[in-house]
Image: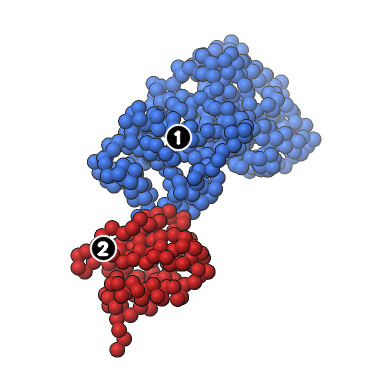
Chain colours: A red, B blue
Amino acid sequence: MEHKVAYLSQQWRDEAEKRLKAELSPEKMKHLTSSVAYVYVDCPDGKIKYLYFKMDNGQFSKILVGENDPPDADFRVTGPYEIFASLTQGKIKAQWALMRGKLKLKGNMVKALKLASLADRMNKIFESIPTHY
Amino acid sequence: MPKLLDKKDPFFIDFPMRVALIQKGMAKERIDVYLGSRLRTLSWVSDAFCPWRSYVVIPPEGLPTVFTFVIDSARIADESWLDDDHVLGYAPMGGMDQISIISDFIKDILKGKKGRIGFETGMSNYLPEGNLTHFEYEAFRAALPGHEFINAHSIVDRLSIIKDQGTINRFRKASRIVDEGHRAVKEALSNGGWKGVTETEIAGIAALAMRRAGSVWEWSFTGGNEIASGYRTGLAGCACTPATTRKLKKGDSLMVDIHAMFKLALGDHAHNYFIGSATKRQLWHARNFIDIVSRTLKSYKAGASPSSIAEEMMGFAEERGFAEYMVPGFEHGIGMLGDEWRIGMNDGPFPYWTDPDHTYKENEVLICAMQYACPDEQIGFRYENPILILKDKCEAMSKFGLRIEVIE
């Protein structure tokens, strides 16, 4: 039976980092330097959690999971746990959620547009992690 | 970082200084954040053409941030002195719609405190004015509860009345460009070239010449280049003539009112002709018009007012027996794109119309705008020209000769 890790746990973070680094080269990440924080509200345990990425020249230099306020980031995407969970299970697309106001973006929209395809690539990788939600 | 501006450029405008002056005005009126939405404010602050619904948020200190429809924000950042961190796009996405993104931005400026937010409301006869709509106002109030909203447009209005040298030079250049358009139209219509030509073609001939000379847009919201021929020149009060497909005919009067935009400064000059021939009666009307325009241009100077000019000119027209053909208004306001029609502050007897007793000051720019219409004889003329008010005279910026010629 496939071993599953808990979503947003330290094990899930480690697995995400391993897969992101293996599958998304700096070239595939367009040598991007930026940072993104996903803020999860209405988590099953009632807490606010976050998933934070920092990229330097296309390399993932920091990936964090935690509770409450995330570190400052160029972009912050806030939304319910359920929506993020659907996103990382491939049930919905980020654009679908943003266009319906299910997720709220904070940051420079024009720069965010350039990141949209990269975010989709990252979500594909999250989708591949055996996870229990 | 904002882009460096070349102070030696004849078209240089000190935009950081403009922002600092607005911030000084905000401090005086205890306004914590200024939310501009009028096209005139956006042009005056950003130095970029903002055709989509746009807003500018000015903090108490530091750089302003423009918010516009996301499809146009990179272009505006490219053309403005502001960098792309200060030109942000809005879109129908969570947190990115114009109300959410701007109200969140204002909350960040105020760091959790409740503040006084200056905004722009009022009314205008000018369609693209851009006052905050009732819906937007209510939505911002709901998104920013506990904040006080103050109508604050007079801060920008006061600062933008007197033009700086860079703005004046931009207007001069836009007027030179319009002169090129007039030359091209005259050349195209001369020696029988007018036969079979439509008003729309004349508008296009002028547009091509002006674009070749550096214009980026026939900016007028009244229909770009306004061309009227024959009976259309004589429609009562007729100061709005988007070109039609009417073909020129011998004996027509022809009104060529063309517009160029150069670095958001606006060229606007109307010139008149007769096509093929003119009767004695038509030439009498033409002489009346040329004489009153010449006299009007000699009357503008610092210290004059719209009412003093109108009184003097209508007296002259009465004396000469053509007062019934004159539209009794002789000018309208002008500034960088979006600033049109009203002259001076909103302090006249009718809200948001020109105060007839507004006293002109040196370095104001306005459009001398005169309309002569005789519907019964299907004849009319228009004169428009940006003028710079000087101490004891005015400078007519467009130099295309003041006359009404018969084009053979």
How far across and down, in percent of the image, does residue B226 sit? Answer: 60, 36
How far across and down, in percent of the image, does residue B154 sit? Answer: 40, 29
Q: Residue at x 30, y 75 (%)?
A: A11
Viewed as shown, does residue B82 lie left or right of A95?
right
How far across and down, in percent of the image, does residue B281 sit? Answer: 68, 21
Q: Residue at x 37, y 36 (%)?
A: B60
- Identify the secondary structure beneath mark 2: strand
The amino acid sitting under disc 1 is Val
- Name above or below for residue B291 compared with residue B151: above
- Name above or below for residue B86 compared with residue A117: above
Q: What is the quadrant of the C terminus of chain B in the image?
A: top right
Viewed as shown, does residue B148 lie left or right of B366?
left
Q: Which residue is mark 1?
A: B19
- The answer to whether the residue labelled 1 contacts the one labelled 2, judged by CB atoms less than 8 Å apart, is no
Tag on residue A67? 2
B265 or B244: nearer the viewer? B265
**Mark 2 belongs to chain:** A
> Few, some or many C-alpha atoms within 10 Å of disc 2 (few <14, some 14-19, many ≥20)?
few
Q: Quadrant of residue B238?
A: top right
- Identify the secondary structure beneath mark 1: helix
Q: Nearer the viewer, mark 1 or mark 2?
A: 2
Please say whether residue B225 is visible from this viewpoint.
no
Q: Residue at x 45, y 34 (%)?
A: B19
The amino acid sitting under disc 2 is Glu
Q: Residue at x 39, y 37 (%)?
A: B61
- Name above or below for residue A122 compared with residue B171: below
How far across and down, in percent of the image, does residue B14 sit? Answer: 52, 33
B63 or B282: nearer the viewer? B63
**Mark 1 belongs to chain:** B
